[in-house]
Image (cartoon, rainbow, N blue to C red):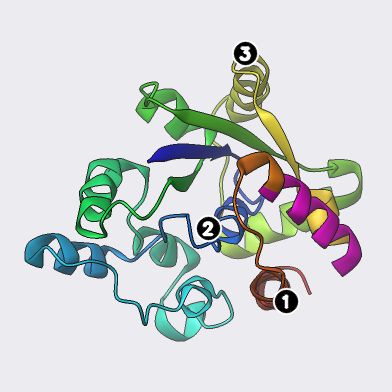
Amino acid sequence: MKTVIILYMPGHAGNFVSRLFSLGPETMPLIRQQLMSESIDHGTEIPDSFDRFTNYRFSTVLDEFDSWQQFHRAYADHKDYVSYRLLNVFCNQKYSRIVFPLHPYEFGNDFYGIDRTELYYVDLDLAHWGQWVETSRQKLHFEDRPNERKDFEEYKDSYNMKPINLSLLLQSEQAFLQEYDRVCQEMNITPDTDQALALRTDWYSSRVA
């Protein structure tokens, strides 16, 4: 199972982007810790009834969680890589890739050059979207760590990462679909336009509008 890492700055929609590119049937769903534990303990696969959109949606976050940080921590992440690989065995190896979002800090400390890895970064025009990012950081308590911007620029260049243009994903539905299709082709995953648009609408209403 190939690992796809998306490097992003805090507040730059890394969780949305990683879920967006985990809609295709060949991608391992990003699942909650509880489901991961239950599946590993019982050696069971992800059920056919599993609904990715319901699992990924953002509009219900504050109905269920006290904070966005708590919401993020509820999901198994890159540190659970071995568990995801084991789960794929229980799923008869039907998933060919998994997409993880990482901040520069986690990338620098937790990235060990996993085999068969693709590297991307979230690109955002801060001249246009900078105020949105800053407002979101204050509202949702996202914080940069020391030197995080410097590390972000260094990692994306030194590892020759490929861009995902968040500005286009934000701009309009037409621009969103253009960038979504482009990246799906780059990642060699099957686009799901209806689900992608539904997820964008759900996330946009929660984090941007």
Give the distance between the C-alpha atoms of the residues marked 2 and 1, in whole angstroms. Answer: 16 Å
First along the sequence among labels 3 and 1: 3
Identify the residue under disc 1. 201
Q: Which of marks 3 and 2 is in front?
A: 2
Answer whether residue 181 is visible to the viewer in this image: yes
Q: Can residue 172 be seen in this view?
A: no
For this orientation, the residue located farthest to the top is 158
Regarding mark 3 in the picture, which secondary structure is present there? helix
Q: Main secondary structure of the magenta part?
A: helix
Amino acid on which the number 2 mark rests in the picture: Ser
Q: Is residue 79 above or below residue 141?
A: above
Q: Name the residue under label 2.
A: 22
Density class for disc 1 (Cα within 10 Å; few <14, some 14-19, many ≥20) is: some
Residue 172, image x, y percentages: 89, 65
Quarter residue 34 falls in = bottom left
Q: Residues within 10 Å of mark 2 (few under 14, many from 20)?
A: many
Whether residue 144 is in magenta: the answer is: no
Secondary structure, mark 1, is helix
Q: Callout 1, which amino acid? A: Thr
Q: Viewed as shown, does residue 133 lie left or right of 145?
A: right
Q: Relative to the observer, which residue lies in front, 91 or 80?
A: 91
Q: Give the range drawn in magenta.
A: 172-184
- The residue at which mark 3 appears reads as 158
Q: Distance between the residues labelled 3 and 1?
A: 34 Å
The residue positioned 45% from the left and 45% from the top of the image is: 97
